[in-house]
Image (spheres, rainbow, N blue to C red):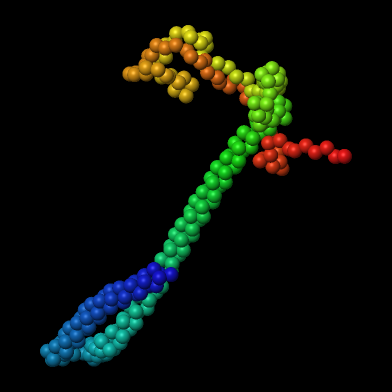
Amino acid sequence: MDIIRLYSRRSLFWIIFFTSMLCIAIDSACHFALNISSQKIVLFLSQANTVSSETGEFIRQASTIIDMLKLYFVPVSTGFFFLFGLLLWLFLRYSFVKLMEKSYLISAKAKKKSETTAKETNSDKQEKIQNDRRLFLHLLSVFQKEGRLLDFFSEDLEDYEDDQIGAAVRSVHESCKKVMSKYLTSGAVLDEDEDDEIMIQPGFDPTAIKLIGNVTGEPPFKGVVHHRGWKVTRLELPTLSASRNPDIIAPAEVEIL
């Protein structure tokens, strides 16, 4: 990933920069301290008239150690800081890569979950639309099966007399009424009879009561019942077969000879 390479380069640069500054500062301080110590030893030897053999041997060993430190301290400390900076860079890069991978996996899972939820939502919507459509067509198919309602609507009534139409309507009405009674029971929205006066109180349900006429201001309103309305008091939805073609309202009938 580009961001990992970019982070690796920048972090390596800054680690090298700061470790180099720290190494230079420590090496300079140590080198200065070793020079001061060496000068003190030389000054002590030049001012001392007599020095015991043990003291002289100690001073010579100390001087040798100081010379070795001055010779090897800088390269050794430089190598140490370089190794420390490299290990620090590797550790930071490894941690950053793991963090990015975890963040990527989390975002990928969240995206996948969101897409799955969206697909399920669309699928549920389509299924609901199909079920509503099938229920509506099923109602028409039941009216056709029991009362020949579609056959009645498809007829041209201009070719029939009024008494013939009346007899046909009576038969269709009785059959369709049986279908309605089988699946649902209806009742009036209002208890009052038509042409009775009524007071519409505040908080009424506008989906249940439709106001007509001179409607101004806020309730309560005084009016006259023109229609009591209808509401469902019992509803039994049929179980639909998934194998049946939902577009078929009534199957064609063929008599085999």
Q: Quadrant of residue 164?
A: top right
Is residue 58 among the parts visible in the rendering? no
243 shown above or below 160 = below
Q: Visible in this render: residue 71?
A: yes
Quadrant in which the C terminus appears: top right
Give the quarter of the image for residue 17: bottom left
163 is higher (above) or lower (below) than 76: above
The number of callouts visible is 0
Residue 227, image x, y percentages? 51, 15
| Residue in the foreground of this view, choosing between 185 and 87 | 185
- In the displayed structure, 37 sits above or below 133; it is below
Q: Position of residue 14 (x, y in %)?
A: 30, 73
Residue 182 picture location, percent across and down: 69, 23
At 64% across and 35% down in the image, what residue appears? Answer: 137
Report the front residue among 233 and 104: 233
The x and y percentages for residue 246 are 67, 40
Q: Is residue 157 above or below residue 59?
A: above
In front here: 234 or 31? 234
Q: Residue at x 69, y 42 (%)?
A: 245
Q: Quadrant of the N terminus?
A: bottom left
Q: Is residue 36 left or right of residue 80?
A: left
- Tell me which corner region of the image, top left, top right, bottom left or bottom right, holds residue 256: top right
Q: Residue at x 43, y 62 (%)?
A: 99
Outermost residue toward the top?
Answer: 196
Please name the residue shown 64% across and 23% down the image.
184
